[in-house]
Amino acid sequence: NAGVTQTPKFRILKIGQSMTLQCTQDMNHNYMYWYRQDPGMGLKLIYYSVGAGITDKGEVPNGYNVSRSTTEDFPLRLELAAPSQTSVYFCASSYFKDRVNTEAFFGQGTRLTVV
Amino acid sequence: AQSVTQLGSHVSVSEGALVLLRCNYSSSVPPYLFWYVQYPNQGLQLLLKYTSAATLVKGINGFEAEFKKSETSFHLTKPSAHMSDAAEYFCAVSRSGGYQKVTFGTGTKLQVIP
């Protein structure tokens, strides 16, 4: 059971480049999330999805886009990379039904540097 | 709005000593509260969660936390620190149990001194 898998683990981008961070889960979870983690700042929610075809903005969505065409996959797109997007990105998933939620399972993270 | 405050970005304890990591929350409605642990270069792992059942919650690796409404606190404790407990710990709060509304604290790095 792989859980939540993120790729790549590390990436260096030049300013203005684009890239997609991949996230897939094999637990049939309906909820998926993208967070960014900056030193001393905790975790900030970028986008989340409550099911295939449904996405919504989190706390810090500017500069990012997401899609959820399948239950398993939730890619995060950076269109025009900026130095402010240098961060560690975490994908997570959980199963939510009838006001009951499982624990959130996190991927190993993607460390992104924009230069 | 909901929020959590973790007191102390770095905490050092001796091996075998009590671990106490502090978390205070703010929520206009009864909260769900969580503690996560993050080991170096890894994702976050749930230690324990409070969802309005017992106020003393036991988690993995010997950790526990007590929900105190009067103090709006949810401090994490472990009676005896082990070297393997060295990690970063995050407190988090949610209003509905849905993780899209989870707000994380800024984290506390625990150092265990041999």
Image (cartoon, rainbow, N blue to C red):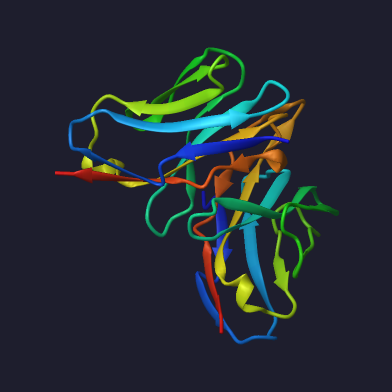
The residue closer to the viewer here, B72 or A51, is B72
Question: On the picture, is A96 further left or further right than B74?
Answer: right
Q: Residue at x 77, y 56 (%)?
A: A70
Q: Residue at x 23, y 43 (%)?
A: B112
Residue A108 point in image, percent of width and height: 49, 58
Marks counted in the figure total 0
Residue B9 in view: yes
Extreme right residue here?
A53
Residue A48 point in image, percent of width and height: 74, 51
Q: Is A78 above or below relative to A98?
A: below
Extreme left residue here?
B114
Image quadrant in which you'd find residue B27: top right
Q: Residue at x 73, y 52 (%)?
A: A59
Residue B63 in view: no
Question: On the picture, is A12 further left or further right than B21?
Answer: right
Quadrant location, the C terminus of chain B:
top left
Question: On the picture, is B74 further left or further right than B39?
Answer: right
Residue B103 point in image, percent of width and height: 63, 41
Q: Is B18 above or below relative to A55?
A: above
Q: Residue at x 24, y 34 (%)?
A: B81
Residue A27 point in image, percent of width and height: 62, 45
The residue closer to the viewer here, A96 or B87, is B87
The residue closer to the viewer here, A47 or B104, is B104
Quadrant location, the N terminus of chain B:
top right
